[in-house]
Image: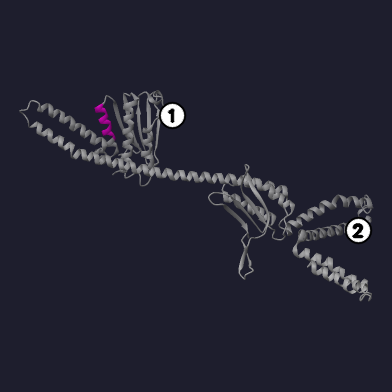
Amino acid sequence: MVAVGAFVALAPPVCLTLVPLLLDIGSIVQPEIALLSLAALPASLGIAVLSRRFFGITRILRRGLLALLVWMALIGSYTAGFAALARWPSWQHGPVPFDLAAPAVTIALVAATFWPLQHRLRRALEHWLFRDVYDYRATLRELSAELVQFGELSAVARHALDRLGRTLDLSWATIELDDRPEPLRFSWGSDTVITVPGNGGGAAAVSPPVGYRVPLIADGETIGRLEVGTKRHDIDLLPEDRELIATVAPHLATALRNALLIRQLEVQVEALADRERALATLNDRLLSVQEEERRRLALDLHDDPLQRAIQLSRELGAWVDCPQAERWQEIVEDIIASLRAVCDGLHPPVLDDFGLPAGLEWLAARLRAETDLDVRMTVQTADSGPFGRLEPELELALYRVAQEALNNCLKHAQARSITVTLRREPARVLLQVADDGVGPAANGVTSESQVGLGLLGMRERLQRWQGRVTLEGGQPRGAVLTAEVRLEEGHGGETGR
């Protein structure tokens, strides 16, 4: 456009006036007329600037026109106001206290009110007509305060892009984060590739023009980049726009870095939770296999060695002529009693036949018979009714907890009496084993983490039902172990079963 304008402007003076004069043939057109074509040069330059929007000329023209209209409106208002004051009807309202039409008063009044009025009016009209007009300090303060309110990564990125895009009237904006294993990209607006015809007749993909790019740096590390496109109604970003983006970038980078750390922690927590669930499943499986192995071993001992010992005892009883038969029979009877105790310890049949209270009573009676301990058993219910049955797996788990607690009392507590309390309520089951021994503190145990594998094993047995096992010092001495299991639908069983 500029070249065409230059040719149109310079061709008439050169061809119609300058060249004929050099050839001594006289000018074809008067020089004054030929020089009129030079007006095409600034016209073509102006058309080129407007069509290509060089130097933000569109923005300058629009805002300049708006400012001109505001100034003209204010000047017209001032003129009409001063003219009305000059014709003040003094005969009706009294004389004017001072001459408002005086030049000094007019200049002072216009100087004091014109600039703030035009500024307020122009800013109000720009906010109404143009979408990229904003208050720099207020926008920066609000955006910085808003970023800290989000903790999720996508929420931080999308809010920042949306706020910048709407404030600056951008065509598009993106945030790219150098996350592993794949970079993350968040987009706002129309940042899609543009398809244009190629040289070979096909279509070529061209990225949209980038208006400004700034790295996102947090704690001295570049975590990504912020890219914004051109404005929707202008091409170039103002220096104020670039300064706002550059100032917001560190705050945005810090918020994104925190969100990334939170996201990594959430992934790690989820991985740990999955591992914990897998370990819990494996623990349940191991406990089930262990109990099945105990049951099988108890049956094997009962069906083979115990029956052989009983048969041997009967045969020895028939040897009336053998002087040592009676002694051998006593030994065999001890073996039979030991084998039965081992079978019952591996898997007590009373637990399967009569339930948890009967199983715990059998356990307490056995401990009383084998030791000098005073073991008391108490069964309670919230409605003073029968305790009922729980699901078999829960009954077995609580039985094993009580068995382990009684063994600990026998080995470490140096107790003289033990009280086992089993209480059932509508929503939970409580099992307490209390002794009057030395207590955990006397054994050098100051926290539950020092109790050892016994307490850990009890908790693992009840983990399937989210059970809790605690160990506390008794009053005035001893220790109290409490196991609590919440009963839910499908876990508690039928009360009257």
- For residue 124, what is the image quadrant? bottom right
Report if the CB atoms under discs 2 and 1 are less than 8 Å apart: no
Residue carrying label 2 = 83
Q: Main secondary structure of the magenta part?
A: helix
Q: Quadrant of residue 456?
A: top left
Residue 312 lies, in percent from the top left, at 12, 34
Q: Is residue 361 magenta?
A: yes
Would residue 43 be found to the left or right of residue 105 on screen? left
Mark 1 burial class by Cα count in 10 Å: few <14, some 14-19, many 20+: few
Spatial CA span between label 2 and label 1: 94 Å
Q: Which residue is mark 1?
A: 447
Give coordinates of residue 286: x percent, y percent: 33, 42
Height in image: 288 above or below 37? above
Mark 2 vs mark 1: give the one in front. Answer: 1
Q: Nearer the viewer, residue 292 or 206?
A: 206
**Could you say which is closer to the camera, residue 311 or residue 490?**
311
Q: Badge 2: how crowded within 10 Å, few (<14), some, or many (20+)?
A: few
Lateral position of residue 268 relative to residue 411, left or right: right
Location of the C terminus by quadrant is top left
Q: Amino acid at mark 2?
A: Ala
Q: Is residue 194 magenta?
A: no
| Vertical order, 314 against 476 (above or below) | below
